[in-house]
């Protein structure tokens, strides 16, 4: 019985350590990404929004908020900032009672500059890994994402 308890405690400690490490990595990544983006005049949310718009071509503002994991109110503020700086153009979609957003040429230019800054950060970090470790990291992070999404929709599947 004592060995079982020790094994459970060791497993819980390892899990806690893994998630604490992931939290620190995400925090540090966002901090470094923020520094890189601030040098070209963007914040993390602005970069996220510009990237989301580019992937979709043009997007409803509400859908952009969902893709960027922020509230619609927060995305509204982000889009207004981007629009004031000439990086996006918006127009009302009366059929859907929503606002659509598209990148301007200046938005595309700034996003290209941001992409270069992000690529420098990524290559600088990943250079420390070999190709095999990069592939393993990608696989593990993908599995963690799938598990978290599954947990959100079907937590009962995780009951032992």
Image (cartoon, rainbow, N blue to C red):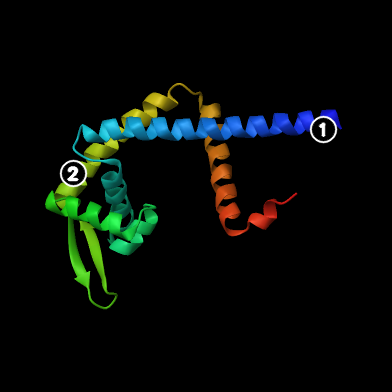
* Relative side of 149 to 124, left or right: right
Residue under pointer 2: 109
Residue at figure coordinates x 28%, y 31% from the top left: 35
**Foreground pick, 103 / 64:** 64
Residue under pointer 1: 4
* SS label for mark 2: helix
Residue at figure coordinates x 67%, y 34% from the top left: 12
- Which quarter of the rendering shows the N terminus? top right
**Foreground pick, 19 / 109:** 19
Query: Does residue 67 appear in the picture of this structure?
Result: yes
Count of marks overlaid on the render:
2
Which of the labelled discs sits on residue 94, or is there none?
none
Residue 158 appears at what percent x and percent y? 68, 51
Name the residue at the bottom extreme: 95
Name the residue at the right extreme: 1
* Relative side of 127 to 97, left or right: right
Q: Residues within 10 Å of mark 2 (few under 14, many from 20)?
A: few
Residue at figure coordinates x 32%, y 52% from the top left: 52
- 1 or 2: tag closer to the N-terminus: 1
Residue at figure coordinates x 54%, y 39% from the top left: 141
Q: CA distance from mark 1 to mark 2?
A: 59 Å
Name the residue at the top extreme: 128
Q: Residues within 10 Å of mark 1 (few under 14, many from 20)?
A: few
Q: Contact (CB < 8 A) between labels 1 and 2?
A: no
Q: Quadrant of residue 40?
A: top left
């Amino acid at each position: 019985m004592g060995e079982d308890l020790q094994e459970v405690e060791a497993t819980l400690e390892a899990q806690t350590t893994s998630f604490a490490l992931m939290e620190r990595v995400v925090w540090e990544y966002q901090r470094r990404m923020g520094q890189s983006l601030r040098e070209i005049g963007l914040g993390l949310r602005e970069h996220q929004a510009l990237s989301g718009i580019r992937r979709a071509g043009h997007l409803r503002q509400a859908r952009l908020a969902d893709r960027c994991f922020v509230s619609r109110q927060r995305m509204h503020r982000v889009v207004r900032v981007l629009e004031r700086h000439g990086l996006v153009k918006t127009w009302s979609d009366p059929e859907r009672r929503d606002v659509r957003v598209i990148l301007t040429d200046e938005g595309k230019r700034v996003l290209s500059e941001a992409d270069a800054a992000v690529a420098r950060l990524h290559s600088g970090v990943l250079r420390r890994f070999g190709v095999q470790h990069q592939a393993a990291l990608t696989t593990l992070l993908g599995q963690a994402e799938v598990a978290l999404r599954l947990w959100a929709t079907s937590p009962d599947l995780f009951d032992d």
